[in-house]
Image (cartoon, rainbow, N blue to C red):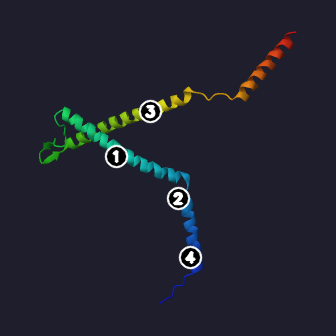
Amino acid sequence: MKKITVDKEKLTEESRGLFKEFKEFISRGNVMDLAVGVIIGTAFSNIVTAFTKMLTDLIGTAFGGIDFRGLTYTIGKLTVEYGTFLQAVFDFLVTAICIFIMIKIINKLVRKKEKEKEITPPPKSEDIVLLEEIRDLLKENNKTKKAK
């Protein structure tokens, strides 16, 4: 049997270097932003799913319980379950409508906040007002000197 020797110092140094490199990678801004985006996306997905289910139930109730999954077409021994496809298309359209409505609401709230910020400019300090008056007087004085 061949004896395997391990250089403990080299292994420890390589481990530290690998750990340091991993630490740098994981603490980069874009990795953290991605992690936050995934978490927020998952939470938003739950909201959209709940809203979609509510809207689908309302539409289903209004039209007498729409469920296309049971629709099939038989050709000889082959059964084509086209209802599953139609149900997936219907679910997609309802989800798209839900996302559209939610984005419209969010955009409206954001625009309202931006308008509130634009409405009131901060008041000028007394120093600025005084300096502007001095500037205007100097401009006026220069104009009268040039006119003579």
Amino acid type assigned to the residue bearing label 1 in the image: Asn
Would you call the spot at circle 2 few (<14 residues within 10 Å), some (14-19), or many (20 or more)?
few
Res 90 seen here: no
**Residue 99 appears at what percent x and percent y?**
36, 37
Q: Which mark is residue 11?
A: 4
Q: Which residue is mark 2?
A: 26
Would you call the spot at circle 3 few (<14 residues within 10 Å), some (14-19), or many (20 or more)?
few
Between 141 and 41, the one nearer to me in the picture: 141
Furthest-top residue in this view: 148
Please give the name of the residue rendered at 57% of the width and 70% of the height, measured from the top-left corner: 16
**Rounded to the nearest whole Å, what is the CA distance between mark 1 and mark 2?**
27 Å
Q: Which residue is mark 1?
A: 46
Amino acid type assigned to the residue bearing label 3 in the image: Leu
Identify the image quadrant of residue 57: top left
Q: Is residue 148 left or right of residue 132?
A: right
Q: Is residue 6 left or right of residue 82?
A: right
Furthest-bottom residue in this view: 1
Please give the name of the residue rendered at 38% of the width and 44% of the height, measured from the top-left corner: 44
Identify the image quadrant of residue 62: top left
Secondary structure beneath label 1: helix
Amino acid type assigned to the residue bearing label 4 in the image: Leu
Identify the image quadrant of residue 28: bottom right
**Rounded to the nearest whole Å, what is the CA distance between mark 4 and mark 3?**
56 Å
Q: Which badge, 1 or 3, comes first in the chain's sequence?
A: 1
**Residue 112 appears at what percent x and percent y?**
47, 30
Please give the name of the residue rendered at 52% of the width and 29% of the height, measured from the top-left corner: 116
Q: Which residue is mark 3?
A: 109
Q: Which badge, 2 or 4, comes first in the chain's sequence?
A: 4
